């Protein structure tokens, strides 16, 4: 009998993501409505890499993660006009209204050293530079100046840490750990 792999033993939630590890799918956009008579849709990009929304790209649409291939994509700031190979009528396109568009995590491009995707940081254990555990990264807020990490402590209270080098001293994905130097007034 073949031994089960770690992946086979994991439980998966309704979104198709592991309850233990990182997500399997990453959202790259939201479809707002149909456009025109050929089945195109208006999509709001939700990615730092909108240039990757292009023809030939395989994506997964909706909660059922229906696989689709982008036939064409054109920027219409702040949106994209997207045509899928599988959708050829405005009626079919309107069924995609308010659906999210995903890509598989394994298809994401590698980031330069010192850069991370949000899904890699959520859930990291956070420690002060003296080794004292603070909590876990619960959420990341995008602000104009820098990101802000919301750290949930054991008592369910939250601490905010600015995503700047003076505060975020180390991120170690292998150890699932972040080391911070919080200001004394926190």
Image: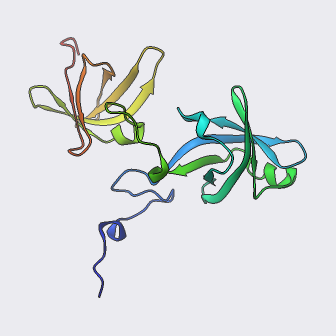
172 sits left or right of 78 in the view: left
Q: Nearer the viewer, residue 108 or 4?
A: 108
Picture quarter containing residue 181?
top left
Q: Residue furthest top?
A: 185
Residue 98 placement (x, y as % from top left)? 69, 44
Residue 166 position (above or below residue 98): above
Q: Residue furthest left?
A: 130
In the picture, which quadrant includes the C terminus?
A: top left
Q: Residue furthest bottom?
A: 1
Residue drawn at x 80%, y 45% is 40
Residue 131 position (above or below residue 2): above
Picture quarter containing residue 17?
bottom left
46 sits left or right of 131 in the view: right
Q: Tell me, what colour scheme is on the image? A: rainbow
Residue 176 placement (x, y as % from top left)? 24, 43
Residue 49 position (above or below residue 176): above
Q: Nearer the viewer, residue 184 or 73?
A: 73
In the picture, which quadrant includes the N terminus?
A: bottom left
Residue 110 placement (x, y as % from top left)? 41, 41
Residue drawn at x 13%, y 25% is 129
């Amino acid at each position: 009998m073949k031994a089960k792999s770690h992946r086979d033993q994991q439980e998966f939630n309704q979104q198709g993501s592991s309850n233990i590890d990182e997500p399997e799918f990453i959202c790259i956009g939201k479809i707002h409505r149909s456009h025109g008579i050929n089945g195109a849709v208006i999509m709001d990009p939700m990615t730092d890499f909108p240039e990757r929304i292009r023809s030939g790209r395989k994506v997964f649409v909706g909660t059922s993660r229906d696989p689709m291939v982008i036939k064409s994509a054109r920027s219409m700031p702040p949106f994209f006009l997207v045509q899928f190979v599988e959708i050829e009528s405005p009626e079919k396109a309107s069924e995609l209204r308010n659906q999210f568009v995903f890509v598989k995590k394994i298809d994401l491009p590698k980031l330069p050293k010192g850069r991370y995707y949000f899904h890699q940081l959520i859930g990291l254990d956070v420690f002060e530079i003296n080794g004292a555990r603070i909590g876990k990264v619960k959420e990341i807020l995008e602000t104009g100046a820098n990101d802000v990490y919301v750290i949930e402590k054991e008592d369910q209270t939250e601490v905010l840490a600015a995503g700047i080098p003076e505060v975020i001293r180390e991120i170690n994905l292998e150890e699932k750990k972040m080391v911070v130097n919080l200001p004394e007034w926190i």
